Image: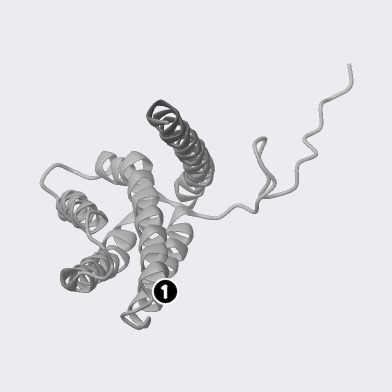
């Protein structure tokens, strides 16, 4: 029987053809991306409300996906490798709390119109929270994460890539479903108006 040969190139997996990349590099890319979005949003004039809302929605989406991935695979891996009461575990617990704070603020901003006076103030506060969280994560947690070893960080990177692809696919399905529901509601509304007009004729 001929010996089976693995023809995959270095960095490829059975689920994709991407180059192997450790999770710390991937998370840093996320950090840079969301900070850039904040800068773009805050540079807009007050009257650009539609663009402001669009950029906020991108910020919220990117941050929430990023947070879910960290909380699902990265933070648990750090907690498992750290002793109870250690600085590493305390830093991770604090990072969870910072995520919750940012999520709460995102929910509050979603209820506001970009033209409201409080809107931009809350965006600025969210920016400060996220930027501080990123700085602490990259200077403390990432340094501690190096103790996991290159192999484990690469494994977590693979999990990150797979999970992020699923998250983005799920977001696309949600948007399509929302558009479909909106179209259906509009059609029913138009039909109701027409039926009312017929009854009144």
Residue farthest along the right direction in this orientation: 2
Residue 82 placed where, x, y %?
23, 45
Q: Is residue 175 above or below residue 21?
A: above
Q: Quadrant of residue 51?
A: bottom left
Look at 22% across and 51% down and name the residue there. Answer: 107
Residue farthest along the left direction in this orientation: 85
Q: Nearer the viewer, residue 2 or 122?
A: 122
Q: Is residue 188 above or below residue 115?
A: above
Q: Is residue 141 above or below residue 70?
A: below
Q: Quadrant of residue 142?
A: bottom left
Look at 43% across and 51% down and name the residue there. Answer: 149
Disc 1 marks which residue?
Answer: 36
Q: Say left or right for 147 vs 103.
A: right
Residue 55 placed where, x, y %?
40, 66
Residue 102 placed where, x, y %?
22, 57
- Count of labels in the image: 1
Residue farthest along the top direction in this orientation: 1
Look at 84% across and 25% down and name the residue there. Answer: 3
Q: Nearer the viewer, residue 11 or 146?
A: 11
Q: How is the image coloured?
A: one colour
Tell me if mark 1 has few (under 14), some (14-19) or many (20+) residues whose alpha carbon lies within 10 angstroms of its own. few
Look at 33% across and 42% down and name the residue there. Answer: 77
Q: Quadrant of the N terminus?
A: top right
Q: Nearer the viewer, residue 136 or 102?
A: 102
Disc 1, SS? helix
Q: Is residue 67 above or below residue 15?
A: below
Q: Nearer the viewer, residue 87 or 196?
A: 196
Residue 49 placed where, x, y %?
35, 71
Q: Quadrant of the C terminus?
A: top left
């Amino acid at each position: 029987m001929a010996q089976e040969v693995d023809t995959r190139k270095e960095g490829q997996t059975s689920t994709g053809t991407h180059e192997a990349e450790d999770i710390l590099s991937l998370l840093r890319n996320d950090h840079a991306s969301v900070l850039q979005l904040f800068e773009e949003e805050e540079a807009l004039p007050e009257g650009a409300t539609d663009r402001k809302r669009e950029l906020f929605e991108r910020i919220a989406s990117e941050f929430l996906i990023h947070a879910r991935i960290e909380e699902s695979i990265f933070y648990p891996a750090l907690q498992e490798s750290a002793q109870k009461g250690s600085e590493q575990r305390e830093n991770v617990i604090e990072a969870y709390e910072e995520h919750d704070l940012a999520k709460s603020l995102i929910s509050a901003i979603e209820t506001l119109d970009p033209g409201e006076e409080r809107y931009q103030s809350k965006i600025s506060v969210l920016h400060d929270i996220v930027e501080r969280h990123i700085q602490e994560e990259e200077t403390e947690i990432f340094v501690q994460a190096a103790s996991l070893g290159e192999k484990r960080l690469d494994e977590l990177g693979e999990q990150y890539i797979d999970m992020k692809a699923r998250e983005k696919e799920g977001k696309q399905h949600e948007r399509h479903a929302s558009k479909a529901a909106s179209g259906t509601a509009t059609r029913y509304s138009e039909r109701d108006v027409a039926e009312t007009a017929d009854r009144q004729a």
